Image: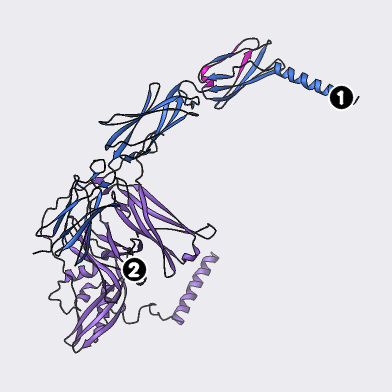
Chain colours: A purple, B blue
Amino acid sequence: MKLAVLLVLATIAFLILGFAFPVHQAATPGIVSGEALPGVGGSTNTPEAAVRSLLGDVQAHDWSRAYSMLANANDVPEEAFIHDVNGNYGSLRTFSSLEGSRTRVLNESGDQALVRADMHWSTAVGPIYDVKELKAVQQGGAWKIVWPLEKQPTVPPQVVPVNYLRWDVISRGPQDDWGTQNVDSPQVRIVSMNAVQHGSTLVIVGEVVNEDTVPAFVDINAILLGKNGQDLDQESSFDKIQHTLLPKQVSPYRIDFPGYNLSQVKNVRMDAKAMLVPASADPVIAVLDQHEQTNVLGRKVLSGNLLNESGRVVNIAQVLATYYDSNGKVIWVSDGYVDRALLPQTPEPFAVDMPDNTVGKVQSYRVTVNHYIREQS
Amino acid sequence: MCRILPAVCLAVCLTATVSLAAQDLQLPATVAAGSGFAIPTSGSGSATLYLVGPSYAAKRQVQLGEKILVQPQEVRSAGRYLAIVRGGGTSQSGSFYVVAAKSASLSFLAHPSRIPVAQRDGVIGVAFVFDKWHNLVRRPETVDFRLAAKDAPPVIQSVRSRDGVAWALMNSGHKAGNAKFVAALDGIEETRVIQQVAADPCHLQIRAERNAKGVLVETAPVRDCSGNPVSDGTVVTFTANGPQGLSTVDVPIKKDVAQAELKIPGPATISVASGVVMGNEVRVGGQP
C-alpha cells in the first residue's frame, strides 16, 4: 500500500517537473532541417541542384515527383521511367536502393547543361556504382532533366521451343544398405592457378573445368601456407565463380585474401569441391561484341552485350571476365552484375572493369555468364 | 643352506605350474562359427560354467564328469572365447578361437559409378567376404570380378582374398553404356552398374554459314576417340572474333550436335572448344 502511494506521488512529481522544464525536440540526426531527405523538394534553380533533387526523389521512391522533374516527359511514359530507375522483371535493380550520389556539372551554356551523376546503389549482392551523364534544360525558369531512357525493343509474341537437357538426381538415402552403390560426385579439375598481388590484397585466379558428363556444383577453396608451412588464412571463391558447371564447361574463379602479401606466402593449397546437383542446360546466353573500351570516367572496361537466347526472362545476370596474358595464363578475373533483367532475344549491355595493372598485359579474354531465374510457381 | 633354497623355490614353482596345467579344460583350438561342440570335464558334483566371447557371455550350472555342450548359437561371432568351470573347490579354464564359417555373402564396393571409356585401371572393385553370421572370412578365397558391357566380351579377373578382402583394378571398355560389374564367389554374386560414358571429344569440327539473322554455326556429330557420341548436354563453346569484337556462346550438345546462331554482321573467324579440347577454325565473310 505504501509502495503504491509512493509511486503515485513520484509520477505526479515527474509530471510537474516535465511541465516546469520542457525539452525542445531536436532535429533527426543526419537529415537537414526542412528537407525530408537530401535533395527532396530541393531547389531547381541550377542544373546540378535539379539533378540532385531528381536523385533525391528517386532515393525517396517518390516516383511521381521525380517524373515531374523530367523535361522529356512527353517522350518518356511514367511507367517506363519508373521501370528504368526502379527495375522490373525481378531484376537486380528491383532489389536495390539508391544509397547516395555525387553530381558534377561537365558543361553549362545558356539554358542547357550536362551533369554527371555518380550513383551508389545498395543491392542484394553488394554495392553497385553507376554513372549517368544527364542533360539539363531550363524550362519556365526552372531546370529540368532530359532522362536518357534506354528503350527496350519489344519481342514479338512467339513460342520459343526449349528442349535442352535437364538433369535430376536420385541419391541413396542414409537408411539404405551399406556397401551398395551410390552416384559419384562429378569429376572437376583445376586447370590453372595464378597468385597475383593487387594492392594490399593477394588474389588467386584460375580456371576449373567439369570433366564429367553430369552437372556439378563447384566451389574452390584456397589455404595460404606461410614460410614455415603453417596455415595463414583460408578463403573460398564465393560468388567469383560459375558455381553450376555443365559437362565440359570451364569457369574462372577468383579468391581474395585482403591484407596478405605474396612475400608472406610459401605455398597455396587448392581444393575443388564438387557436388552432383540437378541442373538445366537452358537458358543459353550469348556474349556478343566483347571489346575493350574506356568509360566516361576514363577507366578501361571490357564491354559487350548479353543475348538471352531462351524464351524466358533471366532476372539477374552476373558477368565473369577472365583475362589472359600472352602465354595464355589467367592474370585476372573481374565480375559485375547486370542490374536489368535479360529479356528473351534482347541484347543487354554490360561492362566489367579491367584493373590498371593488367591493362597492358591482357592478350585475350573470355566472358562467361552466371544467371539467376526466379522460380515461377 | 644358500645352495638349497633356490632349488626348493624352483621345485615349488614347477609343482604349481603342473597343477595349474592339470586344471585346463580340453577345448578345441578353433571352432567354426555357428557350430556347437562338447567340452569334457573331470571330477564330480555340480559346477558353474562361464563362457565369455566377443559378443556373448553366459553362466550356467553343469555337472562335472559329464560333457558340457556348447550350443551353435553361443559361438556365432568370430574371435577368442574363454571357458571357465568352477566347482568342487577347483577351477578349470581354457580358451579357443571361433573362426568364420563358410563364405555366405559378399560386400561389394565398386568405384566409380561413372567412367569415361578406355580408361586404364579406372574401375576398382573391392569385395569383403563374410560368413552367414557376418564374420569376415579371413582364410583365402577366390573371388571372380567380371566387368561386362553390352555387345562386348566380359573381362574377368580372379583374385585370392587376403584377410577377407579381395580387390581388382580393371580397364573400362571402349563402348559407352552401362556395364555390369559382378563379384562372385561359390555361387554368391553381387552386381553393381558402372556407367561407361564417352570420353573427351575428338576431332571437333564445325561449319558456319551466314543467314539473314547472323551466322549459323554447327558442329559435326561430336564423338570421342573411340567413336562414341559425346553425352548430350556437354558444353561446346563457339568463339567468333571479328572487327566488332569477340562473341562467345556456350551451347550444350543436343542429339550429338551443338549449334548456335551468332548475331554478328561483319566478317569473323569462328573457333570451337569443349572443355580443354580445341576444334577447327572457320572464316565467314560479312553481310552483303
Q: Is residue A235 above or below residue A200?
A: above
Identify the image quadrant of residue A53: bottom left
Q: Give the distance between the C-alpha atoms of the residues marked 2 and 1, in whole angstroms.
A: 97 Å
Identify the image quadrant of residue B82: top right
Q: Which residue lies furthest to the right in this view?
A: B1
Q: Is residue B275 magenta?
A: no
Residue topped by disc 1: B5
The x and y percentages for residue B180 are: 31, 31
Residue at 26% across / 60% down in the picture?
A316
Q: Is residue B74 magenta?
A: yes
The x and y percentages for residue B237 are: 24, 55
Residue B157 visible in the shown view: yes
Q: A358 and A176: which one is in front? A: A358
Q: Is residue A46 above or below residue A180?
A: below
Q: Is mark 1 on a helix, strand or loop?
A: helix
The x and y percentages for residue B83 are: 62, 20
Q: What element carries label 2?
A: loop
Q: Which chain carries label 1?
A: B
Residue at 50% across / 64% down in the picture?
A264
**What is the crowding at mark 1: few (fewer than 14 residues within 10 Å), some, or many (at least 20)?**
few
The x and y percentages for residue A4 are: 51, 66
- Foreground disc of the pair 2, 1: 2
Residue topped by disc 2: A361
Quarter of the image with the C terminus of chain B in it? bottom left
- The part of the chain drawn in magenta is B59-75
Label 1 amino acid?
Leu
Label 2 amino acid?
Lys
Could you tell whether A224 is left or right of B231 in the image? right
Could you tell whether A122 is left or right of B17 in the image? left
Residue at 29% across / 63% down in the picture?
A365
Q: Is residue B2 above or below residue B40?
A: below
